Structures are given as C-alpha cells and as structure tokens.
Amino acid sequence: MNSSRDPFEDAFMKNFVAVGLGVIITYINGMFVIAFFKNPVFYTDTRYILYIHLVINDIIMLFLSVTLHVLSYALPFLNVTVCSFLLLFATTTAENTPLNLAGMALERYIAICKPLHYPQLCSVNRTYILIGLIWILTFIPALTDIFIVLVNEPISIFSTSIICYSKSLFSTNQHFMRAILIDALYLSCVWMTLIFTYLKILQAAKAATSDQVSAKKARNTILLHGVQLLFCMLSYIIPLLNYFFFALFPRHRTIFMYLGYLVTNVIPRLLSPLIYGVRDQKMYRCVRMYFTCSLFNTKVKPKANEI
C-alpha cells in the first residue's frame, strides 16, 4: 500500500498523521460508546443499538487499518497467517458498514410508516439477531478469500512472509470475481433499501397531518446514510483516480496512495458521530457532558418526539 522506499522523514510523518488521526477519531467515537453503555435508556432503543454497533465497527476497522498501515513501514514482510487474520477482520468490518446503514434506514422506515408494528418488528432481540446476521453475511465472503488461497497454493504458504496488502495475498481471478459479485450484490441491495425507505418516508410525510418534524428528521437521516455509503464506495473509485494521477505525476505516486488511504480508510470513520450522533439531542447531551468532564455519571432521561 505504501512504499518502503520513502525517506525516513516522510515515512515518519505519514505514520504520525495516520496514528494521530486514528487516536483522535477513536477518542471521539469512544465517547459515544461510553455514553451508550453508561445510560441504560439507550439499551432498549433499536435505533441506538444499531448506531452504536456502527460506531464500534468503525473503531475496530480504524484500528486494523492503521495497524496495517504502520506495519507496511515497520514490518513490510509479515507472516501470511497473521496477515490473513488481519485482512479477514479488516474486510469484514469494512463490509459491515453498508449493511448496517441499510438496517438503520429500515428501522426509521418502520418507525415512521409502520408505527403500530414497530414494537414487534424492531424489538431488542430482533435487533441483535440482525447484527449477528450482518456479521455472518460479511464474515463468510471474507473467509472465502482464505479458502481460495488454500485451494490455489500449498499449505506451506502460511509459514512464509508477504507484503500484507489485500491484493498481494488475494490476487487470483477467483478473488476478483468473488469481490465483484458480493460487493455488487450488497451495495445494490443497500442502495435500493435507502431509496425505497426515503421515498416511503417522503410519501408518509406528505400524507401526515401531524409529527411532520419526526418524518423530516427521519428523511434527512436516510439522506445522510446515503452520504456515508458514497464514502464507503470511494474505495472502488480511488484506485481508478490513482491510475490517472500516477500517469500525470509519477514522482508523487506514494503521496496519492497515502491521500487515498486517508480518504477511504481513516477520515470516513469520523462521519458516524458527526452526521448522526451529534444530530440526536438525547445522545449529544450525554456526550457533551463527557467531553466537558462534568456529571460523568449523569443518566439521560428520554423525551418525547426525539427521532
């Protein structure tokens, strides 16, 4: 992913920025996680359970991404077994995000358009089942990449060392086809879910005679989910842009690769608290207390009509 031929000063600054951003973003996300677990009122709300799962998933993904980035400089050749383990969970957490966004959009759709069925369809138990299903749907395809390696390479490959980068280990046509099929299937389903729920909530808002504020907030939330999904898709666009910039600026190849890494792997992990958590007044009030180091044990009481 990054060149080990970078001068020491450049390598140090790149890793310093990546680790620094990782620590800052993890700290911010961690405040939302603390707010969730310190206040039992959030435990019974499907919306907050799905949201905090998204935040925790982002923390894990960010940790793995920064770890792989630092290792690409500090330990360029990594044992294949260790590398496979890191890539397995990095891929799983990366693909969790779009599916979690789809689940959050469906939850808002049911809350606005099917309020009478909401307690049954969006119970806490069903929410945890959905989270488990999301992990299964993303873990199995990621595990398939390792099985493809086992089929095409001798078992001894796992005792060797390799540059720990997805395309260096999972480089066969089978890996390429697996990625294309699964990503196309999941992303198309997520986009259809977001469009369907947005249109249904828009329709419900026009027909509603009351609670227009809740419907508007839910509609804006789904739009923001679409923005998050676009950032998730940057990982498919950045390689194409890199080819373009590499041809124009061959001497700055590593700079463009590094910027692409920050844009696709690090900075988007800050989106969840900024465009969702901060908008929610119940969560925001609690997190603000922790950021200002006051009333750390204060419990948040629910208010009506907070969507």
Image: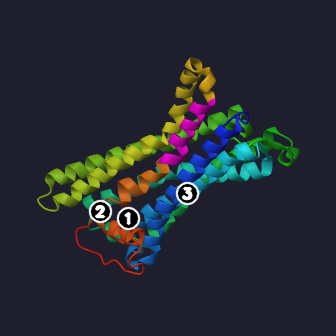
| Residue in front for this viewpoint, 295 or 88 | 295
Looking at the rendered image, the quarter that the C terminus falls into is bottom left
Extreme-front residue of the structure: 9
The amino acid type found where label 2 is placed reads Ala
Whether the magenta-drawn stretch holds residue 101 is answered as no
Residue that mark 1 sits on: 47
Q: Are marks 1 and 3 in contact (CB under 8 Å)?
A: no
Q: Residue at x 52, y 59 (%)?
A: 26
Task: Give residue 111's mark.
Answer: 2
Could you say where residue 227 lies in the image, as x and y percent from the top left? 38, 44
Q: Are marks 1 and 2 in contact (CB under 8 Å)?
A: yes
Which is more N-terminal, label 3 or label 2?
A: 3
Q: Secondary structure at mark 2?
A: helix
Q: Secondary structure at mark 1?
A: helix
Q: Which residues are magenta?
A: 254-267
Q: Are marks 2 and 3 in contact (CB under 8 Å)?
A: no
